[in-house]
Amino acid sequence: METTFEKLRKLQEVLSKRIEVEKDIDDIPKALLIKEELLNRLQKSFIEKNDNKVSSEQELARLKRLMNDAERSREASEKRMDEISTQREYEALEREIKVSTEAEQEHRREIQKVEKTLEVLAEMLTSEEDLLNQQKQEIDEEKARIVAIINDKKESMGIIKNKSGLGIVPVLSGVCSGCHMTLPAQFANDVRRGDEILFCPYCSRILFHEDGNEDGYVTDDVSTSGSDGEASLSDLIDDDFLLD
């Protein structure tokens, strides 16, 4: 029995380590921060470029109006050429035509620049939108994976975690030191003898008698509450492990 209890104590150490692993798993969502930060930067960049696109479209519309105005002004001035009668009128009208033509050409050049900018922005927005969707999908998949891992670990570690990591506890004065419930006198005696592995009937922890501990027993009619509803620690112990 001494060898068996020693194995059980080692098992408890392993289970306690698993609790630490579970705590580490709680930190896994932090790994998402990097991807979420990247997603935020991509969204910010996308919004800025989209705003630039809207501004460029508004500027393009304004330049086209100005170019059309300059074009109409030039055409009107050219039509008036047949109506002039003096050199002075001719020179004044010629200046008007020149100014309108230069304005029209300048607006046309600006329009070409803005159209080129819009073309580049459209390509960048398409690329970034694809990247955004990909990043969102990766984050959703990562979150689902993490939730599955955490749920699996919490389920397998639930028993030990709910018992503060203590699956093997001593009996003190006829009381389980894990759940602090008074044990039946005969049961406490059986624990003292140590002939077999015994589990607390209330909290399912493994019980053992500790040398130097004088148990005070109580009668079997002491009122106690029921089990805590948790699965037994024995569910986590392989029979082959105890028989090694």
Image: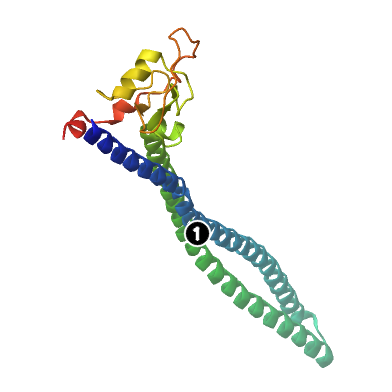
> As rendered, which of 114 and 6 lies closer to the eye?
6
- Tell me if residue 130 comes above or below residue 6 in the rendering: below
Q: Give the residue pinned by disc 1.
A: 38
Residue for point 30% across, 26% down: 234
Q: Position of residue 128 (x, y in %)?
A: 48, 59
The amino acid marked with disc number 1 is Leu
- Image side of residue 188 versus residue 196, left or right: right
The picture quadrant where one finds residue 97 is: bottom right
Residue for point 59% across, 71% down: 114
Residue for point 53% across, 71% down: 116
Q: Point out the residue furthest to the bottom here.
A: 87
Q: Position of residue 147 (x, y in %)?
A: 42, 39
Q: How many marks?
A: 1
The picture quadrant where one finds residue 211 is: top left
Q: Position of residue 133 (x, y in %)?
A: 45, 51
The picture quadrant where one finds residue 52 is: bottom right
- Tell me if residue 33 comes above or below residue 1 in the rendering: below
- Tell me if residue 230 comes above or below residue 140 in the rendering: above
How was this image coloured? rainbow
